[in-house]
Amino acid sequence: MSETTNVQFSEREALLFHSEGRPGKIEIVASKPMATQRDLALAYSPGVAVPVQAIADDPATAYDYTAKGNLVAVISNGTAILGMGNLGALASKPVMEGKAVLFKRFADVDSIDLEVKTEDVDAFINCVALLEPSFGGINLEDIKAPECFIIEQTLRERMNIPVFHDDQHGTAIITAAGLINACLLTGRKLDEVKVVVNGAGAAAIACTELIKAMGVRSDNVLICDRKGVIYQGREGINQWQSAHAVVTERRSLTEALVGADVFLGLSAAGALKPEMVKDMAKAPIIFAMANPDPEIRPEDAKAARPDAIVATGRSDYPNQVNNVLGFPFIFRGALDVRASAINEEMKIAAAQAIAELARERVPEEVAMAYGVRHVFGPDYIIPAPFDPRLMEVVPAAVAKAAMDSGVATKPILDMEGYRQQLRGRLNPTNSLLTLAYEGARAHPKRVLFAEGEEEVVLRAAIQFKEGGYGVPVLVGRDDVPERLRALGVSNPEEYELHNSRHSPLVPQMVDFLYARLQRRGYLRRDCERMINQNRNIFGAVMLQLGQADAMITGTTRTWAQTMREVKRVIDPEVNRTPFGIHILVGQSHTVFIADTTVNERPSPEELADIAEQTAQVARRMGHEPRVAFLSYSTFGNPEGLWLENIRAAVGVLDERKVGFEYEGEMAPDVALNPRQLANYPFARLSGPANVLVMPGLQSANISAKLLRELGGDSMIGPMLIGMEKPVQIAPMTSTASELVTLAVLAAGGIAR
Ligand SMILES: NC(=O)C1=CN([C@@H]2O[C@H](COP(=O)(O)OP(=O)(O)OC[C@H]3O[C@@H](n4cnc5c(N)ncnc54)[C@H](OP(=O)(O)O)[C@@H]3O)[C@@H](O)[C@H]2O)C=CC1
Ligand SMILES: CC(=O)C(=O)O
Ligand SMILES: [Mg+2]
């Protein structure tokens, strides 16, 4: 995306995000059934004694019988939390929990945060070293320099699993990848560039070492800390800093930057001033990587030097140079070959793989569907963390480097098979939802929130606006600005508000509604009353009159009631069957269930329409559809009275010659479980179904709601499909972020 974007949120929102529901960001879920006494007897005593003995006899089997092989500890003592400084072990917990969930989200690595309350180097080292049996790898985090160097070095020597201080090496790898590409774009050679590194701590020293190893000349790198340039002979510098001290007359950051090609900021917010940037060389490369706030804001850097290539550590500006691009995938590769360490070869392989990926074109279907233009250039020197290709490319490169350099204890024999397996580990829905959000930011639309008096709706509207996803158009009373202010909004007057009491649009709206309903038994005054008193009708007419691009409602009335109101104003699209889809999203699977909201006893043609349109939605969300028409019966067994419609629907699709797999009638276990499906070798599904077409509304709606209430996975929807205008009716229990997701899907044309 080329536009500069800037996600904003209030402090209240950030706290609410962390406290809502279960406090914090992680929970532990059992990976084996725990339902019966037998399960418990196997999982715990006495059954557990068997793997205990096996591991005692052969320690390598711990990888077969426990979670060790996919488990990474994120460990900190909180002495250098982001760029916020030493705030202690406990305060670092939100960051460490955050890293743990990023491991899972991006690379399906299970991870747990451990905050160790000591600044004593030996105590910390002992604590971590003793944990070796528990984990497949150790990610050290936010530990200040110089202690971090001793800690990491000693632990690498003492432990037989990868120990990786991410602020050092993760950051260095991503910085190196970004630098390679920025130099390519500006026609520079690494052995000629003059670099100023601001900050002389963990990240800065590691970045300096890696870029020197890649060819940047030692006498071309100046490092600065708060006191200025680290020159040879300066008092009070440590051994890691003195290794990079140079002979120079320059003393301040300002002096250091005169004529410099590259600024690498790994220090603190605001450390780089616009006037300093002015003296840098032509087309300067500025990586302001301090978190959460960079050394200079990109807009200020660009104002001072429009010819600059600017990167930050943040996700809300172009060019995010942040270690999140590396650590999940680097550990994925290291774990998969049971590497005993993450060595230089693996780091360089990761940096090169990431740099190369940015130079390749983003897959066309992703770019087209979401209007996201990621083309190698000054605003795109590095892939975005949600780029699904990272998961395939980086772990494979790291695993290969581990094998080639002799640290892989379980080499991968079939590399192509491994890449395929990596692809299957991630659910495309996750990355496509992120891309849908990015697409919304690139093409902001006007979304009407009809129930502007509900707190949850206002919070969704705030998130929608502050996230830059579009313009919320609120329907509500005059006290809405006051309510927005109470929710932490400082500029509520910037929110567009429509109130039927004094909207100048009302006469036009009444005309529209009356023209539509006069032959359906409504008088003009009925229409006036509906416009004045019913927010869904008011909102839907606004949508019809082109005042917004999409509409979200549903939190104050039941779904059916809301649908009745909406349908008074908005028709189904010509030749389409309106219906509803619930989408069940797990870590590695997505299932689309339809029709969960509209048609009580769909005809064969309607079932076929529902299948076709749901398959299209699945494709828009990155899944190759495999449709199962569900029943209690599988291919006529048991026989029953209600199967004809379903069989006829399969026949309708046969005639239509649709371009996706479908089959039926079949029971859900046959549709979803390959072992059951194997009993029907003639069935035309190449794998478990991901689109489930239900025989009727009873079973569909009940299943969707059961799954929402009892299932562990998250549910999107119901999405309303097939209406002439993009209107979405959310469940009454929706959270603010669920409403935002529906708004983004509706505005982006994915839910239609
Ligand atoms: N984008 C990314 O992926 C990453 C970014 N970072 C960022 O890098 C920064 C440093 O992290 P880390 O190395 O772990 O921390 P450390 O505590 O190890 O190092 C901090 C260093 O920054 C220096 N510093 C602080 N303020 C200034 C300033 N105003 N001007 C010059 N130097 C300054 C300190 O110098 P002194 O000794 O004089 O105080 C010290 O050398 C943080 O902002 C962090 O968020 C870190 C890792 C990854
Ligand atoms: C990104 C990161 O690890 C940091 O800022 O410390
Ligand atoms: Mg960090």
Image (spheres, rainbow, N blue to C red):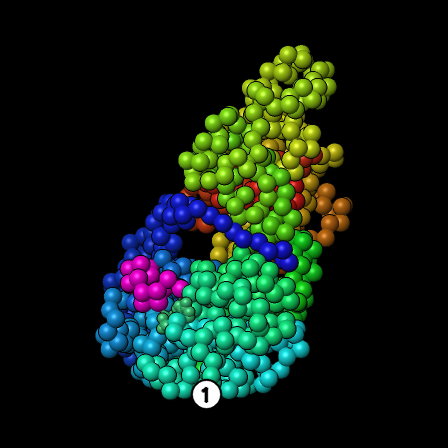
- The quarter holding residue 130 reads bottom left
At 55% across and 68% down in the image, what residue appears? 277
Q: Which residues make up the magenta segment? A: 79-93
Of the residues shown, which amino acid type is indicated by label 1? Val
Query: Is residue 366 found left or right of 82 in the rendered image?
Result: right
Residue 524 locus on image (x, y percent): 67, 13
The residue lying toward the viewer, choosing from 245 and 410, is 245
Residue 721 locus on image (x, y percent): 64, 39
- The quarter holding residue 244 reads bottom left
Image quarter where the C terminus lies is top right
At 51% across and 25% down in the image, what residue appears? 477
Q: How many marks?
A: 1
The residue lying toward the viewer, choosing from 221 and 185, is 221
**In which of the image's four quarters is ligand 1 placed?**
bottom left
Q: Main secondary structure of the magenta part?
A: loop
> Circle 1 sits on which residue?
247
Q: Is mark 1 within 8 Å of ligand 1?
A: no
The residue lying toward the viewer, choosing from 334 and 499, is 499
Queried whether the magenta region covers residue 255, the answer comes back as: no
Which class describes the residues within 10 Å of circle 1: few (<14), some (14-19), or many (20+)? few
Q: Secondary structure at mark 1?
A: loop
